[in-house]
Amino acid sequence: MKGIKEGFTRRGFIKATALIGLIGSVIPDVLMPKKLFAAAESGKKAANPKSLTPEEALHIPTVDIPLIAEDGSLVPITVSVNHPMTADHYIKSIYIVDDLSPIPSKGLYRFTPANGEAYIATRIKLAESTNIRAIAECNKHGKWEGDADVKVTIGGC
């Protein structure tokens, strides 16, 4: 065959391909850690979670998740925001994040005033015990963050 360098064997090709694949799988983890992406999305937090100001109580999402999840493959979660849903003041979206997961984004849910309330009930996969964050975005007051801890006994990812 013309165009192929003599001495480049099939075995050499396979070794080179394996080396390129290994390097390609290691470099992204070293150069771009998982937490870099998830941590980029955040919102205002309560100054004192036990005593919320009226503005915080109106905007900070409530995350309801079991304290202990026996199986991380299907963990029920509800997120709600006690906020009015009027045409000029409403919750635009809720974003659920697990910073420790291989896939940090657990869902982005969009709302309009026609929804009547900002409420989500779903199931998510969790690989390990973690802190789940919910970020609610108000059309007037920006992003607000609530969270909850969950202990996972058997990982689902």
Image (cartoon, rainbow, N blue to C red):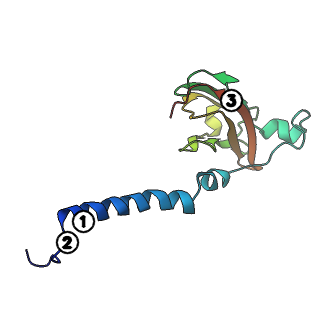
Q: Residue at x 43, y 62 (%)?
A: 23
The residue singled out by tag 2 in the image is 8
User: Quick check: can you spot residue 70?
Assistant: yes
Quadrant for the N terminus, please. Answer: bottom left
Dot 2: element: loop
Q: Is residue 84 left or right of residue 154?
A: right
In the picture, the disc for residue 86 is none
How many labels were placed on the picture?
Answer: 3
* Residue 88 rendering spot, x and y as whole percentages: 72, 45
Q: Are marks 1 and 2 in contact (CB under 8 Å)?
A: yes
Q: CA distance from mark 1 to mark 2?
A: 6 Å
- Residue at point 62%, 33% (across, down): 115
Say which residue label 1 marks. Answer: 12
Judged by depth in the image, the label closer to the viewer, 3 or 2, is: 2
Amino acid identity at mark 2: Phe
**Residue at the limit of the structure toward the top, as seen here:** 70
Local packing at callout 3 (Cα closer than 10 Å; few below 14, some 14-19, many 20+) is many
As helix, strand or loop, the secondary structure at mark 1 comes to helix
Residue 19 sits above or below residue 88 on the image: below
User: Depth check: 69 or 40 in front?
Assistant: 69
Residue 87 visible here = no
Q: Earlier in the sequence, mark 3 or mark 2?
A: 2
Q: Amino acid at mark 3?
A: Val
Question: Percent position (x, y) of residue 89?
Answer: 74, 43
The image shows residue 107 at horizontal and vertical percentages of: 56, 40
Residue 32, placed above or below residue 131: below
| Mark 2: few/some/many CA within 10 Å (<14, 14-19, 20+) | few
User: Which residue lies at the image location 67% right of the left edge and 22% below the top edge?
Assistant: 68
Determine which residue is flagged by label 3.
Answer: 150
- Residue at left 22%, top 61%? 11
Pair 1/3: label in front: 1
Mark 1 nearby-residue class (10 Å; few <14, some 14–19, many ≥20)? few
